[in-house]
């Protein structure tokens, strides 16, 4: 039997919060070795839909968690996107090691609801995908290097496994598994109170893998762009916009680029919330999939 | 085919150009530098050239505001359990004096900084990023208390952030 998703992700968050609060008490010296929550508020971005540190849709070069280069950090997150014809729920965990390496796992559940019946795959048919991510910072520091234009640059990969093997093949995908590769450049421009990211992703994914990878007519890696611009309103709040381009491999339905406008609020280094309005375009022949994106994150 | 869409193409080219420029700049940066750049930490004991104009200095409420910020800041850092230890035995009168002059100078005020350069001033302290950032957070609280606007705070932090390379040695 499927565990209740909401209960699962809520308990996940609660666990993370408990972990974070026991590991580190505010305004006190680190009490657990290798936990310092020493980076500045919001400089880790937030956990994005694929579980990596980033914006909501884009993956950034920053490392998850607030650990400095002498410490480890991490997060758990739960995200819910409510679209006219679908819902997407995901939850996951990430660790940042010495502000250098990030490892993440996220479970994505794309629920077709009543649309499933119209698509002929059954009401509430859900595409489940596991995303395992690894990211390594190569050079630069997004925050310290304010006297140069050099951004923080990281490379990473995401192994994605879609559990609905038969259906993703039926819709025309070539594979149910895929690997995305990316290189990301992120920089905070303190003079302008801006954070900017540009990411180049090489992918075969259809709708980020929720509909499998590649197709009979196109099984090549495509270079795709992810970009975020955020304005730092206060130490706790960043507002901005994002774009993410995607391939268009499948024959039965066109695929659009994704956009969002977002506001992220970091209550403190252990809890943050992101609210966005996302335009995910056409998904599996259902157009104008625009809706609210809510994400909660707990960590240290 | 979607890749030919002009926006997508422009976006992909833009990201490639950014990444290429970043790696080129980084390669250049890691090459042996013949001489300190003007404005670099080595060239100026205050650690940076001042912010042009007097807008930021005014946003800090000039010398009186900077004095209040630094007095509050020194109280904070010397009682912050994360970093208070670092200030044991420090001459706090002198620390206040130097910091006031440095912030006045960096924000574009009519001051000269006559103290030690950042590397010398922090030599042997074995400071980590944790210490540097904790201090920055305390400064943010002191600037908040003086009601310095957030963009003006960030203008100063933009000058202070690169000093991490000279200050953090561990």
Image (tube, rainbow, N blue to C red):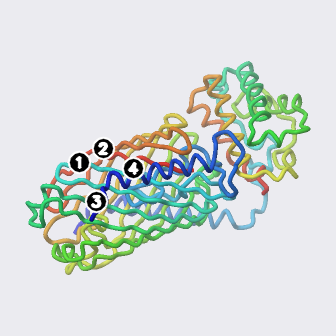
Query: Along the polypeptide, which appears first: circle 4 or circle 1?
Result: 4
Q: Is A33 left or right of A219, judged from the image as shown?
A: right
Please name whichever residue, A50 or A92, is drawn nearer the observer in this view of the structure. Answer: A92
Identity of the residue drawn at 80% across and 50% down: B42
Label 2 residue SS: strand
Residue for point 75% across, 32% down: B105
Disc 4 + disc 3, Cβ < 8 Å: no
x%, y% of residue B106? 72, 34
Name the mark nearer the viewer: 2 or 4: 4
Q: Are marks 3 and 2 in contact (CB under 8 Å)?
A: no
Mark 2 crowd level (few <14, some 14–19, many ≥20, 10 Å Cα): some
- Tell me if label 1 and label 2 are in contact, CB under 8 Å: yes
Task: State whether residue B148 is above or below residue B7.
Answer: above
Q: Give the letter of the chain under mark 4.
A: A
- Which residue is rendered at x = 74% and y = 49% of the image? B40
Q: Which image quarter holds the N terminus of chain A?
A: bottom left
Nearer the observer, disc 3 or disc 2? Answer: 2
> Which residue bears the numbered disc 3?
B6
- Residue marked by disc 2: A277
Residue that label 4 marks: A10
Answer with left or right where residue A144 lies relative to residue A273.
right
- In this rendering, do the residues under marks 3 and 2 share a single chain? no
- Say which residue label 1 marks: A290
- The Cα atoms of the two marked residues, 1 and 2, are separated by 7 Å
- Residue nearest the viewer, comparing A271 with B67: A271
The CA distance from mark 2 to mark 4 is 22 Å
């Amino acid at each position: 039997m499927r565990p209740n998703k909401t209960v699962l992700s809520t308990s996940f968050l609660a666990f993370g919060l408990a972990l974070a609060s026991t590991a580190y008490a505010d305004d006190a010296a680190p009490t657990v070795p290798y936990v310092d929550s020493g980076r500045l508020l919001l400089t880790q971005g937030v956990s994005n839909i694929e579980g990596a540190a980033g914006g909501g849709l884009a993956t950034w070069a920053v490392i998850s968690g607030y650990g400095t280069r002498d410490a480890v950090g991490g997060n758990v997150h739960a995200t819910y996107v409510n679209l006219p014809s679908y819902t997407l729920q995901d939850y996951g965990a990430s660790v940042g090691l010495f502000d250098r390496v990030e490892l993440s796992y996220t479970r994505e559940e794309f629920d077709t609801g009543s649309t499933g019946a119209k698509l002929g795959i059954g009401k509430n048919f859900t595409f489940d995908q596991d995303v395992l991510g690894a990211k390594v910072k190569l050079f630069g520091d997004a925050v310290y290097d304010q006297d140069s234009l050099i951004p923080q640059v990281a490379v990473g990969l995401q192994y994605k496994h879609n559990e609905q093997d038969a259906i993703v093949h039926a819709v025309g995908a070539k594979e149910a598994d895929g690997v995305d590769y990316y290189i990301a450049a992120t920089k905070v421009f303190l003079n302008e109170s801006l954070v900017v990211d540009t990411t180049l992703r090489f992918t075969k994914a259809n709708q980020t893998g929720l509909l499998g990878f590649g197709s009979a007519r196109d099984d090549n890696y495509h270079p795709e762009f992810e970009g975020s611009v955020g304005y730092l309103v206060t130490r706790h709040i960043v507002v901005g916009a994002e774009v993410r381009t995607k391939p268009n491999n499948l024959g039965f339905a066109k695929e659009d680029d994704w956009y969002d406008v977002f506001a992220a609020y970091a209550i403190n280094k252990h809890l943050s919330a992101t609210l966005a309005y996302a335009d995910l375009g056409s998904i599996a022949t259902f157009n104008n999939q625009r809706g609210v994106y809510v994400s909660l994150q707990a960590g240290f | 085919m979607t890749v030919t869409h002009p926006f997508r193409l422009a976006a992909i080219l833009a990201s490639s150009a950014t990444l290429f420029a970043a790696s080129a700049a980084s390669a250049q940066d890691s090459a042996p530098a013949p001489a300190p750049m003007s404005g670099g930490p080595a060239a100026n004991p205050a650690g940076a050239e001042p912010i042009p104009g007097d807008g930021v200095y005014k946003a800090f409420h000039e010398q009186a505001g900077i004095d209040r910020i630094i007095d509050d800041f020194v109280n904070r850092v010397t009682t912050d359990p994360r970093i208070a230890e670092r200030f044991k035995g420090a001459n706090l009168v002198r620390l206040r004096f130097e910091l006031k002059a440095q912030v006045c100078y960096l924000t574009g005020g009519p001051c000269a900084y006559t103290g030690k350069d950042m590397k010398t001033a922090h030599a042997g302290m074995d400071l980590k990023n944790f210490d540097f950032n904790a201090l920055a957070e305390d400064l943010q609280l002191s600037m908040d208390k003086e009601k310095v606007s957030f963009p003006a705070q960030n203008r100063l932090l933009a000058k202070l952030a690169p000093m991490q390379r000279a200050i953090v040695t561990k």
